Amino acid sequence: MAQLERVRTTSKVIYTAKTHTTGGRENGASRSSDGHLDVKIALPGSMRTGTNPEQLLAAGWSACFESAIAVAARKKKIALPAELAIDAEIDLHLGDDGYSLSARLNVNLPGIERAVARALVDEAHQICPYSKATRGNIDVAINLV
């Protein structure tokens, strides 16, 4: 059994996502145990039909981050605009030390005063599990647009 780097003994598992992936980036496929996710995997920029891991990370992180903004807004009793949107960008880098990632979350909170929007985004970055997982591991910019 794999050793976890850090175990949170006081936390309770509330959900476990399970996927089965074969073929990797070049000619892969991934399916969730419940069948709701069933995607082909392709290299970024390839002509093969499919998504890539960077797009999947962008989609997952931006969805989670939007929910974290909603949690922060509820705490502050702030109504969020229906037009709230996040454009996530995940960069795949190749350097002397191998592959790495960086990310930008471009958050659109129309109708919310900029200082209030910044406070919501900053709190969401502390709440969101994806932000926690990447903190200190990759370069992340969270921009208000």
Image (spheres, grey):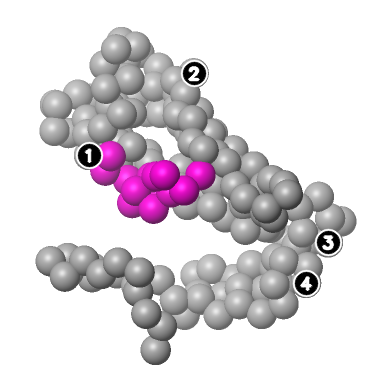
The spot of residue 37 in percent (x, y) is: 53, 68
Instruction: Tell me the distance, in whole angstroms, between the alpha carbons under discs 1 and 3.
Output: 38 Å
SS at circle 1: helix
Q: How many marks?
A: 4
Amino acid of disc 4: Asn
Farthest residue to the front: give it: 96
Left or right of residue 86, residue 22 in this image: right
Q: Are marks 3 and 4 in contact (CB under 8 Å)?
A: yes
The disc, 2 or 1, on the residue closer to the chain's N-terminal end is: 1
- Residue highlighted by disc 1: 71
Q: Secondary structure at mark 2?
A: loop
> Could you tell me if residue 58 is visible in this image?
yes
Q: Residues within 10 Å of mark 3 (few under 14, many from 20)?
A: few
Q: Position of residue 89 (x, y in %)?
A: 59, 38
The mark nearer the N terminus, 3 or 4, is 4
Most common secondary structure along the magenta stretch: helix
* Kind of residue at disc 2: Val
Region in magenta: 126-138
Identified at 27% across, 22% down, the residue is 119
Q: Which is closer to the viewer, label 3 or label 4?
A: 4
Distance between mark 1 and mark 4 Cα atoms = 38 Å
Tell me if residue 135 is in the magenta stretch.
yes
Q: Mark 3 — residue?
A: 48
Labels 1 and 4: the sequence-earlier one: 4
Query: Is residue 40 positioned above or below 66 on the image?
Result: below
Q: Residue at x 49, y 36 (%)?
A: 140
Q: Amino acid at mark 1?
A: Val
For residue 91, what is the image quadrant? top right
Q: Amino acid at mark 3?
A: Arg
For residue 45, which numbered disc appears in the image?
none
